[in-house]
């Protein structure tokens, strides 16, 4: 158990809909990262937050957005869903922004999103 | 610029034989290197990490990796494969001022009885 929690575990929805995925980082971790893993794209970094502020952006679509709240939990919002958005969405957390050698990410169990 | 290459997308071994998963990296800075494992339908788990201490790093489940600067490699090994080792393995490099993580594409390990 990494200490990172994600809810829900599974989510099934229809095209055009909007969903929210939630992540709680490990106790003491200030950074949260979101990843998308699909069969054809592999593991894709989406976005990182540090202590409530957006820190880095990866391959995140404009239909997707995220935020980190004062209690450090984070939410990933996916809107106007398409079939291709079906994937496993992982959240990870780290103490800092990985600027310190040895700072590393710990991953949650993921949310499996199925868009029908 | 930093990059990481996992040289094999699929590796198949017999139970009880050695495992070698290869990873080469490119970095202008002194890197940190990680191996993660992902079992089917499970999340990603940190196997081991190198952060400029000992070049031979021991991880969980009997895995180890050796940092070879001259070869820019960080290959993952295990002396004897177990059926439960069947999973996807990812090599990751972190370097540069922002220590951004660069992920390899993964190596799928199959263990045959």
Image (tube, rainbow, N blue to C red):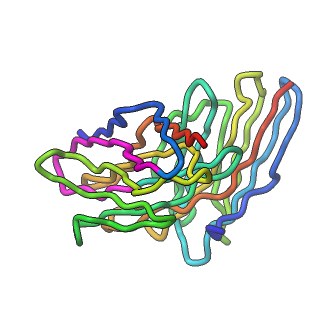
For residue B38, side relative to residue B76 (left or right): right
Where in the figure is residue B21, as x and y percent of width and height?
38, 44
The picture quadrant where one finds residue A13 is: top right
Image quarter in which the N terminus of chain B is found? top left
Q: Residue furthest bottom?
A: A28
Number of numbered labels in the structure image: 0
Give the residues drawn in magenta, as a range: B17-34
* In the image, residue B23 above or below residue A63: below
Q: Residue at x 76, y 23 (%)?
A: A82
For residue A18, side relative to residue B35 (left or right): right
Where in the figure is residue A24, as x and y percent of width and height?
69, 65
Question: Is residue A58 covered in magenta?
Answer: no
Q: Residue at x 73, y 43 (%)?
A: A77
Question: Is residue B18 covered in magenta?
Answer: yes
Residue sitting nearer the eye, B42 or A35? B42
* In the image, residue A38 above or below residue A98: above
The picture quadrant where one finds residue B3 is: top left
* In the image, residue B9 above or below residue B58: above
* In the image, residue B6 above or below residue A32: above
Image quarter in which the C terminus of chain B is found? top right
Q: Residue at x 78, y 46 (%)?
A: A20
Where in the figure is residue A94, as x and y percent of width and height?
50, 65
The picture quadrant where one finds residue A72 is: bottom right
Where in the figure is residue A1, as x and y percent of width and height?
66, 69
């Amino acid at each position: 158990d990494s200490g990172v929690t994600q809810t829900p575990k599974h989510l099934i929805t229809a095209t055009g809909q909007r969903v929210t995925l939630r992540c709680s980082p490990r106790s003491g971790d200030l950074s949260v990262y979101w990843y998308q893993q699909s069969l054809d794209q592999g593991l894709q970094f989406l976005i990182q937050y540090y202590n409530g502020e957006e820190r880095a952006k990866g391959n995140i679509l404009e239909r997707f957005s995220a935020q980190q709240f004062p209690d450090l939990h984070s939410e990933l919002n996916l809107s106007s869903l398409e079939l291709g958005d079906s994937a496993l969405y992982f959240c990870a957390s780290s103490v800092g922004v990985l600027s310190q050698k040895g700072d590393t990410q710990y991953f949650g169990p993921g949310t499996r999103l199925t868009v029908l | 610029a930093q990059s990481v290459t996992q040289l094999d997308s699929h590796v198949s071994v017999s139970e009880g034989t050695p495992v070698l998963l290869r990873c080469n990296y490119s970095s202008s800075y002194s890197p940190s290197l990680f191996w993660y494992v992902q079992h089917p339908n499970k999340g990603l788990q940190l196997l081991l990490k190198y952060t400029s201490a000992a070049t031979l790093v021991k991880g969980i489940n009997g895995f180890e990796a050796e940092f070879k600067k001259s070869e820019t490699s960080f290959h993952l090994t295990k002396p004897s494969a177990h059926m439960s080792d069947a999973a996807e393995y990812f090599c990751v490099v972190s370097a540069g001022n922002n220590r951004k993580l660069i992920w390899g594409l993964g190596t799928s390990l199959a263990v045959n009885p």
